[in-house]
Amino acid sequence: MVTDTPITKEKPFKICFVCLGNICRSPTAEGIFQHLVNESGLQSYFYIDSAGTSAYHIGEPANSKSQKIANQHGVQLKSKARRFNPSDLEEFDLILAMDHENFDNLQKMDVKGTYSGKIYLMREFDPKPGTKAVPDPYYGGMDGFQEVYDILYRSCKNLLEKLKERIDK
Ligand code: 4NP
């Protein structure tokens, strides 16, 4: 994945989770991944962030339904929405799009394809086979937010297990 260079404390691995608004899916992924990293005591090895491809909700905290479900699982969502910048393509080691539209928008920003090896769909890391998009829960009820949480939890857990193999302590 991306490169197989070791992850060290000197060069923490930088991950950016990306959705449309940066208030539902990507802040949830960021919060879950940070929670799992903290549980494993690996905070020094990772820098975790999230962003949106749109400017609709810049500066807003995570959606209240996303926060409610995350909190029920002991996960805090601390992000404030920001827009993904083209410079983030250089900055991050791994950029994870929640759905195909987010993925296409990231690829359009990467005009020359320089960073294509860093951009993946989040559900490439979902251990459960099925559709490759994390569904947009914004206009739906709590069930949709719970489904998003479940998808992101198992995908983040699987991703961290893979990345742990690269940590050089
Ligand atoms: P997110 O959800 O991309 O998971 O943060 C959405 C948030 C806002 C909108 C759409 C999706 N919106 O259209 O404002």
Image (cartoon, helix red, strand yellow):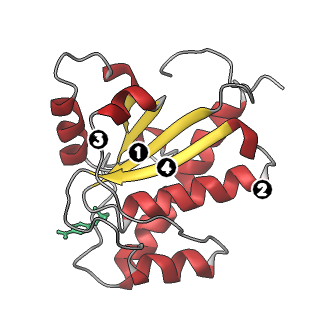
Please state which of the two labelled residues, at mark 3 or mark 2, is closer to the viewer.
3
- Tell me which amino acid carries mark 4: Asp
How far apart, in angstroms, are the residues tagged by discs 4 and 2? 17 Å
103 vs 150, left or right, is left
> Is 18 above or below relative to 159?
below
Q: Which mark is residue 39?
A: 2
Give percent across and percent down for residue 87: 32, 32
Q: Which residue is mark 4?
A: 49
Q: Which residue is mark 1?
A: 123
Please state which of the two labelled residues, at mark 4 or mark 1, is closer to the viewer.
4
Please state which of the two labelled residues, at mark 3 or mark 1, is closer to the viewer.
3
157 vs 141, left or right, is right
Q: Which residue is mark 3?
A: 85
How far apart, in angstroms, are the residues tagged by discs 3 and 1? 22 Å
How far apart, in angstroms, are the residues tagged by discs 2 and 1? 22 Å
Give percent across and percent down for residue 28: 48, 64
